[in-house]
Amino acid sequence: MNFRAFEENLFKLFMVVSLILVMGSLLLVFAIVIYKGASALSIEMITQVPQGGYYLGKGGGILNAIIGSLYLAGGAIVLATVVSLPVAWYMNQFTGRSRYVSILRDILDVACGIPSLIYGAFVFLIIIGLSQRTSLFWGIITVALFIAPILIRAMDEVMQTVSHRLKEASYALGATEMETLFHVVTRQALPGIITAIILAFGRGIGDAAAVLFTAGYTDSIPTSLSDPVATLPLAIFFQLSAPFPEVQARAYASSIILLVIVLLLSIISRMISKKTARYVIK
Amino acid sequence: MSLIKDRNRREKIIKTLLLVPTIGIGLLVIVIAASLYLRSEQILSLYPLTDLLFSSNWRPLAGEFGFLPFIMGTIWVTCLSMLISIPISILTAIYLSEYAHQRIRKSIQPFVDLLAGIPSVVFGLFAVLLIVPLIRDYLGPFFGAATSGFSILAGGLILSIMIFPILISISFEVLQMVPTETREAALALGATRWEAIKHVVLRMAYPGLIAAIVLGFSRAFGETMAVLMVVGNVPIIPQSLFDPGYPIPALIANNYGEMMSIPVYDSALMFAALLLLFVVVFFVVISKVMLLRFRRGRA
Amino acid sequence: METHIEIRNYNLSIDGKEILKNITLEIPKNQITAIIGPSGCGKSTLLRSMNRMNDLVEGLKYTGTIKIDGNNILNKDQDVISLRRMTGMISQTPNPLPMSIFDNVIYGPKIHGLKDKKAMSQIVEQCLTRVGLWNEVADRLSDPASKLSLGQQQRLCLARSLANEPEVLLCDETTSALDPISAKIIEKELIELKKDYTILFVTHILRQAKRLADHVVFLYFGEVIEAGPAEEVFVHPKDPRTQQYLEGVFG
């Protein structure tokens, strides 16, 4: 037994400890949230909007936030996808290397790194400038803005992995660059694209900072784009800030709901990925 | 023949149309920076930049806007989180890349992704439930500090957990990019696995690892909700880990409501946002430079 | 011997490095022309010049003319799409598209505007029969192409090219990645197909060239050393280098 082997085993120990810490934190987060929130979780929570005095401990639920989040993130992901897919296509049309596209990728990476709070501040300036009010519409715009760079890069990455030989096969048969992009590249990259969209949706639903100053908050379910809208993360935040333990407990329960949504999205994306991979060439 | 002319024309039209959203998104960062700057002009014209950045007097109602407490708060929390997260994440990445079986790797992957997907508020909630009491009731007294638990330490701890996924995944990818031949060469010369990693793999990978760390930094800098919920939000310069702090994102998020009613306050907050933007952009650029170095070093 | 493709003073360079030097050739119609030579001598590059796939490579420059049926395809005004319809290419490793078997075969005609479903089914059946795949896949046309074996995939790629009704078939080491049995099948098909198509076949396997070729081009470091009918080149080579190559001295 010498120093070298000892050093290796020592570091291996450190590594395993690190891994345990990481996995452990994940488990701990789920465990604590579920443990604390399970008692307050009830059918009313997911089927009712806050009744009068909800924040003082009286009846109701967070249906407003659940539906609100779904509307907001749903609208945002549709908008973001409509913008992102064309940009990803644009970036992948060239067979060679394009300086402009490289620069664009760098700009997008920077945009990805900008905190969602800043996007919120930016849209807030627009709202003020146009003398508008916070609403579902602006919330959608904000979330779409901040997930678009992430979505574009994710789609771009998948499209880039499409083997050049597939594209060549298409060109050799007389297809144009765009035709190849639409019929071959996108189809090959489809599982990855769909995963990217679903994950972006997850980020949109979970974000509070962006919608903090652009979407408003309300106890009712919005009926039009100009209504303010409640979102799950903000609902959790506000309930937690209330001085009543019953309301705080509801915050934990709301977190369970949010976690369940995130978990579901993760599972769904994996399933859909497998399904759409049918025609993909390995 | 005309059908082909149509296709060629259609191709050109589509390519031009695609340019529209592309240029739009490309200009996004600049537009955001410009808007924030325009709004900051007011406060920048009223006070010299050095006062803003280095004064610790934060009394907006009296017209005093010293950002130092917030800058320091951000630095304390971010540095603490990086200090905790870097060794753990890199060791985990090394383990996954160099030692773990394919099967273990495949099964850990979804969990790391799940950790990445947990919303910020839920982390904040968790921190309020577990970390804050832990600090208040055990860690604080152990070190002889009287603290409410809402502190830099709480912020740093929860932030470190939140950046595990990004540090681990980028480090892992970087390590994977080191060619197998390099490892094998070292092993063939009689090095242990760990020595091969230490002397060869890490040496090759280190610019890429720096890139990962820098990106983690930028993510930690901008993280808002979770930190806001546990860091105390008191505008003082922290003197110890157990003091409360007030990072810049928390400042902006907490006060946007008042900012329209107090003069110059909105400009001040937008200036804070601009600062944040600059720092984050700076870090991302550095990480790209490091990644470029890494790729060149590999070739 | 009727000339289908005429190449005159064709030079090609990549980033300044000369790959093909002063190529002058006449490719006969409806025959199999084998392009032989040591690896890395520009055989594939020459092949890819015929359908201007080389245009996709950066830093690539060429001069000279390549005329198919008298029409210079290197002309700036040449419509590359219709050129590629006229020339079918089958590469070394099969590259099926991420679609069903049916969609793979009909991809070319669909792109070029075919909409009639009945015509599509006819074409698919015809082409798959032509390459001997019909019986093997007729009952699972909507299966992903990736499910086929390598040999079947290559035949699929051949069928796919045929669906476009080309005049020229460009085969780049088409059987090199296949097992001997699949290779034999494809060779047999090519011999059948030459009745209707002009076939250029790049190969580094001399025995294969001897089996298939009617006409031979020996390419050595980017230059045409010798070209002519197979019996002449194989039995009575004029250039000593050709002789050496045939004896296996290099490549």
Image (tube, coloured by chain):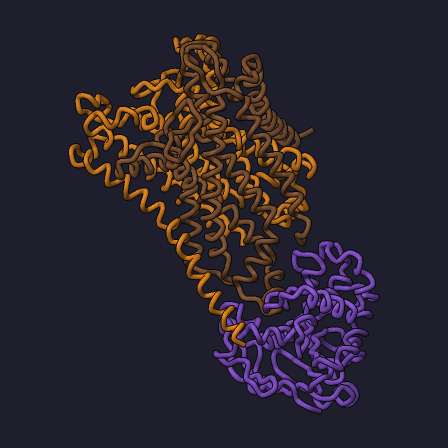
Which residue does the image show at 57% across and 66% down from the upper left? A175
**The N terminus of chain A sits in image quarter:** top right
Numbered circles on residues, count: 0
Q: Would you identify the image quadrant in which residue C201 lies?
A: bottom right
* Percent of width and height locating residue B277: 34, 38
| Front in this rendered view, residue A126 or B101 | A126
Q: Colour of chain C?
A: purple
Left or right, A111 with reference to A255: left
- Residue B132, percent across and down? 45, 15
Q: Which color was chain A given?
A: brown
Q: Position of residue A212 (x, y in %)?
A: 37, 29
Residue in the foreground of this view, choosing between B280 and B11: B11
Colour orange, chain: B
Residue B122 higher or lower than B284, as above or below: above
Visible residue check, residue B75 = no
Residue at image position (61%, 41%) is B196
User: Residue B168: percent from the left, percent from the top?
Assistant: 54, 35
Q: Nearer the viewer, residue B246 or B257?
A: B257
Taking the image as shown, residue B218 lies to the left or right of residue B255, namely right
Q: Residue at x 41, y 14 (%)?
A: A52
Direction from residue B180 to residue A233 in the image, left or right? left
Is residue C203 in view from this perspective? yes
